[in-house]
Image (spheres, coloured by chain):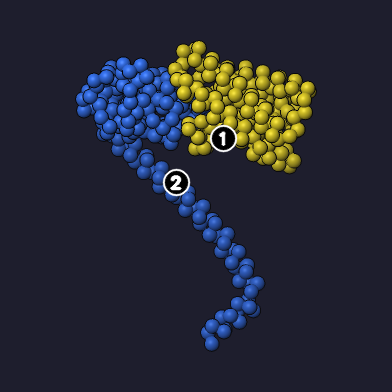
Chain colours: A blue, B yellow
Amino acid sequence: MTLSRREFGAIIFYHRNFIQNEKLKKYIDLLKNRLNAKEEIYLENARLKNLLSFRQKSSYRLIAARVIARSADSWSSSVIIDKGKRNGIKRQMAVITYLGLAGRVTDTQEFTSKILLISDPNLGVSAIVQRSRQEGLVSGTLGSHLIMKYLPEESDIRIGDVIITSGLNQTYPKGLLIGTVVGIGREFSGLSRYAIIKPAVNPSNIEEVLIIIS
Amino acid sequence: MKNWIFFLIIIVLGMLQVTILNYFKIFGVGPDLLLISVVIASLFFEFKWAFVLSVFAGLFKDIFGANIFGINTLLFPLWSFLIVRLNKEITIDYNFIRIALVFIVSLLHNTITGLILIYSGNLIPLGLFLRIVSLQSIYTALVLPLILWIGQRLLIY
């Protein structure tokens, strides 16, 4: 009885149900959009919480900035941030995230600055292997990995070793995490070795950074 | 009116190139939408406007690049001039010819840019140089039909 009544009602009120269905579909789309926006806010909140907690714990004086644009060409890996000279940012300052080293300030304007990321081949960072204190020079490859060069043939380096900044270059304070070794190879000349490093900071999805002021 | 719409298109393509296009990179290389806009402008506009549009696109790319300022501002109008001259000599009506043209222009542009960067002291290993020059030229050429389709739709309306 109930089933036949329901089916009969559906036929009689077909038009009303159709309109209601359309309205509900639109409402679902609206809710989906709102849910996406909330998800984005939730993720941003998590990232900012990490940055804030790192900033409070850190012994450095830091300025937080947001990435507003990325390099327009494929020859370099850089980003533009929303803080500049007005905020006390100067050239050559080190840029980090709560995960580790991100790059260096190469140019500053009043309200924006250009950051050369660690994945750029022109950014050389003096680094050491945390376990064995072996020194080397880390530079980018414009890809997802970094390369640590000028390692002597007998250097003590293994896959899984952590690479940090050596502090020999005044730009980067000692002990900033760069990444972990994922591969080791021999240079073409046979005189030295190199290590492939997976960076702690993924340069392709940086959204917020911290600039070390002092 | 069309010229001003194309200015807006260049701005939109430029904004895409410095923002979301980074998520579509293959082996660290993305398509050069601004170079595509220069080729399209040179094919569909008179030289005076194509020149202005290419200088604008070049400036845009230089502002957002981390390399020597002015390379694109100088090279883009040069490509524009050469394409306009070529367009007078041969017919460039078919899409596959346009794709080939973008590929050649992109190849030349990337080779010259790379060589300028190397000679100005930038560290670019040979493997990286070849990867950027070849992959970006192919990627840029393959994206052209999509940009042409979108551009045509916009200009019709």
The residue at which mark 1 appears reads as B16
Name which residue lies at 78% across and 23% down. Answer: B88
In the rendered image, the vertical position of residue A172 relative to residue B25, given as above or below = above
Q: Which mark is residue B31?
A: none
Name which residue lies at 51% across and 24% down. Answer: B130
Work out whether residue B154 can be spotted: no
Quadrant showing the N terminus of chain B: top right
Observer-nearest residue: A37 or B62?
A: B62
SS at badge 1: helix
Name which residue lies at 47% across and 20% down. Answer: B126
For residue A157, which quarter of the picture? top left
Q: Amino acid at mark 1?
A: Leu
- Label 2 resides on the chain identified as A
Q: Amino acid at mark 2?
A: Glu
- Callouts 1 and 2 on one subunit: no
Of the two numbered discs 1 and 2 in the rendering, the one whose residue sits closer to the viewer? 1
Image coordinates of residue B65 in percent, x first then y, are: 52, 23
Between the C-alphas of marks 1 and 2, the distance is: 20 Å
The residue at which mark 2 appears reads as A40
Quadrant showing the C terminus of chain B: top right
SS at badge 2: helix
Image coordinates of residue A179 in percent, x first then y, are: 32, 31
For residue B102, which quarter of the picture? top right
